[in-house]
Image (cartoon, rainbow, N blue to C red):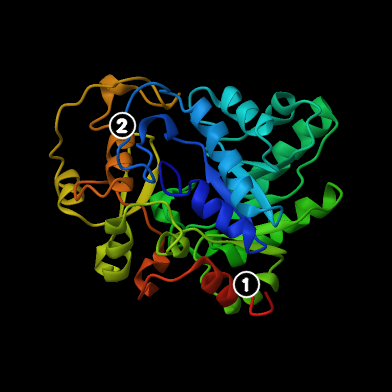
Amino acid sequence: MGVGISRWRLTGSVAAAGGVGTLAAQGLGRVSDLHRPDAARKWIDPHGIDTLAHEVRAALELAGGQGLVAVNVMVAISHFEELVRAAVQAGAHAIVSGAGLPMDLPGTVGDADVALIPIVSSARALRSICRYWEIEYGRRPDAVVVEGPKAGGHLGYKEEQLDDPAFQLEAILPQVAEIAATFGGFPVIAAGGVWDHHDAARLAQHGADAVQLGTRFVATDECDVHPHYKELMVRATAEDLVVLRTPVGMPGRVLRTPLIERFLAQDFDRFKCHFRCLSVCDAPKVSYCIADHLIAAAEGDPDGFYFAGTNAVRVERIESVAAVLDAVDPRA
């Protein structure tokens, strides 16, 4: 949900409805303000630090004191610490962090009153985080997101593990829940392939205390992304979902477009790296700039890179955030 998809409007709307809205910190300095059509994309804030603070405050205002506003900051992104601090200073209630192990996240936030929520794909990763945080900072996670292989975007698995039963949420959740209990007990949030309350109830039986949705929120009225992205979701079939390795070095699940067909055929254009947005990216050695193509998707360019989870095939219409939350928790 990063790079222009989950911004202040979607985040604030989810929070206003009583959920935890999560704002993506990635790429904000490179996307135009979709709610100000006259504002061309400018490079005045290349790392998005000032823009992130503005987005957090806008989301909090829209939330009106309801729910929680979280910010997702990828460990792999350049200026990770600056973005975390900007989110905290702007009033974010929680920092969610994956794409690497956020080992020093407690040190970055210091004594700030903010929840820390790592994203993991295994019990081993959570154990490492808990041990390190406890020894170095005297702190434990406030919750953990367990992302399974049915999620959209970058996946913390090898390609051969994506369909392996041993790596599905049902198998991983009990192991993660056991680690969480060992370290004092904190909520376990299941993510990746969650559609409605049936999924939530099923995953609860395997140790989940809550669920996180991404793909379904793309096709909502309140999502900040360009309408073309939402329309692609509505039209998506199983054949439209593709997994390919990206310059980040991980497999990613994306909607099939002519651009993706070219990439699958190893047909790439030369590109210029404007700045090193990912610490793990070696621009001279990669085939294309994923940030450029993710921004293009957020802005509706047909040649964009449209991340989506397996549930994209179930999207039949654009609906409201309230309708999505109703489907996940009918009691809401």
In the rendered image, the vertical position of residue 37 relative to residue 52, given as above or below: below
Q: Is residue 125 above or below residue 75?
A: below
Near-viewer residue (227 or 309): 227
Mark 2 residue type = Arg
Q: Which residue corresponds to the image point at 35% horizontal and 71% vertical from the top-left?
A: 313
Q: Position of residue 294 (x, y in %)?
A: 32, 42
Q: Which residue is disc 1 drawn over?
A: 200
Residue at 39 percent of width and 74 percent of height: 314
Q: Position of residue 176 (x, y in %)?
A: 70, 54
In depth, the one of 40 and 316 nearer the eye is: 40
Residue 182 coordinates in the image, percent (x, y): 84, 50
Horizontal and vertical percent position of residue 43: 35, 23
Query: Which mark lies nearer to you, 2 or 1?
Result: 2
For label 1, the SS is helix
Q: Residue at x 43, y 58 (%)?
A: 162
Q: CA distance from mark 2 to mark 1?
A: 39 Å
> What residue would you read off at disc 2?
41
